[in-house]
Image (tube, rainbow, N blue to C red):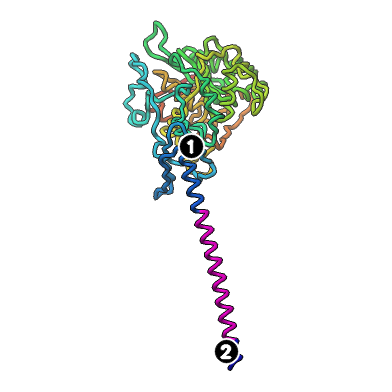
Amino acid sequence: MNEQRTTWLLVNVHLILHISQMAIHLFSTLTFLCFTSVFSIICFLSWTHNNRWTHFLIKVRENDTLLINLQVEPETVIPRFQKMLFQKAPTWTFDDLYIQDAPPRPTKCAQSLRTSKDEFFSRAFLPNIRLYLHKDTINMSEWNRLSHFNNPFGFMEFKYEEVVPAVKLIPKPKEPLLSPKPGGDGCVHCAVVGTAGILNGSRMGAEIDAHDYVFRMNGAITQGYEEDVGNRTSVYVHTAHSITTSLYLLKKYGYKGAPHDEGIKYVMIPEGKRDFWWLNFLFKGEKIPDGYYKNKEPRQYYSGQFNESRFYVLHQDFLRYVKNRFLKSKTLSGGHWAMFRPTNGAFAIFLALHTCDTVDAYGFMTEDYKNYPNYYIHRDTKSKVIFYINHDYILEKDLWHKLHNSKIMKLYQRTSETKEENPGTR
């Protein structure tokens, strides 16, 4: 009996010691967690006080669309958003709100596209959307707002010091991009010329050059192709990538550089950090010391026609507006959302729609695109259109057709009824 009682006492003592050890461990854990929590709160409050945060709210809607309202005092840079955190394009409460400038010049043009009664176009079109980025458009508040959007629609993942110094070098445009020609009908008539193979053999050169102004973009080769594409360029739309790579990719086709007509106006699409690096040294007139364009001298690519008063940089609001209201691709709902953006040609067309009264588009994708080579420079090969994941060519094709049918612009097309001896029939 004594042995059983002794055994029972030993078991209970062991159990009591075990429970005591667990309690001490639990108490230590809770004490540690409390300490770290209090320490974290103190650090957070100290950090937010130092950064003068006033409001931070995150909530998830029923459709799993992330909404983040972030308000920070103007002198504070918000933390950088990382693209990898989003499985699809994030939707912000202010996603479809844009900075708008003073109303555009009143037009005396009776046939101006601005007088269109088309329901879709009238509802989506903002005639005074801010077109250009320059030193007076950037401050801390604007930086924080645009940091919610991925490039080229904003500054997501960019560092303040990588972008703002370059923007501060961009002068405010002293004049509109285009004005009616003296002695004309009061209208601004524009042609936007793409590089699609439909222009191969089109004989549309004279008609293109007859416009008041001619827009071109990317590898805009005209020498040797004048009969089909014309040879005038009034506005050249580009990125740092397109103006540099076209020079060696198209050299075998006779391309010698970007158009440099006297008085030409250059319009740049700031699609990434390298574009702001390019702009920084372009305005300084210096050779780029390092990075993606190391040892390149940006001004050399404009063949002596670079002039600050004739150089424009498209604003992120304008680029986002084109994407949101006219070219919202299904790609934005998937894992490749951050790669998508409209083509340079699409941005050129919309720039023309906002600065011209009438717009004729040549060399853009049409319903019968499979009948033509990829580029009009491919005279001897039947190259196929390459569908890159960062663009939605079919969406753009359908939009050009829709705008054509709505008489917003005219799209050059060649139908099955077009005779070979008269390929320019529209």
Residue 96: give x, y in percent of width and height. Answer: 40, 34
The amino acid sitting under disc 1 is Ile
Is 187 located above or below residue 418 in the figure? above
Does residue 208 appear to the left or right of 284 in the view shown? left
Instruction: Classify mark 1: residues with Cα within 10 Å, few (<14), some (14-19) or many (20+).
Output: many
Q: Is residue 27 above or below residue 305?
A: below
Looking at the rendering, in which quadrant would you find the N terminus? bottom right
Q: Residue at x 55, y 33 (%)?
A: 159
**Camera-side residue of 82 and 180:** 82
Residue placed under numbered mark 2 in the picture:
5
Q: Disc number at residue 78? A: 1
Residue toward you, 231 or 309: 309
The range drawn in magenta is: 7-36
Q: Quadrant of residue 222?
A: top right
Residue 120's disc number? none
Rendering coords of residue 137 (x, y %): 45, 24
**Kind of residue at disc 2:** Arg
Considering the numbered disc 2 on the image, is that residue within a helix, a strand or a loop?
helix
Q: Secondary structure at mark 1?
A: loop
* Residue 292 among magenta residues: no
Residue ranking furthest to the left: 117
Sequence-first disc among 1 and 2: 2
- The answer to whether residue 295 shows anywhere in this view is yes
Residue 55 picture location, percent across and down: 41, 41
Mark-to-mark CA distance, 1 and 2: 70 Å
Identity of the residue drawn at 49% across and 32% down: 154
Q: For the point 52% across and 45% down, which residue is it? A: 85
Q: Position of residue 273 (x, y in %)?
A: 57, 30
Q: Nearer the viewer, residue 278 or 233?
A: 278
Q: Residues within 10 Å of mark 2 (few under 14, many from 20)?
A: few
Circle 1/circle 2 CB separation < 8 Å: no
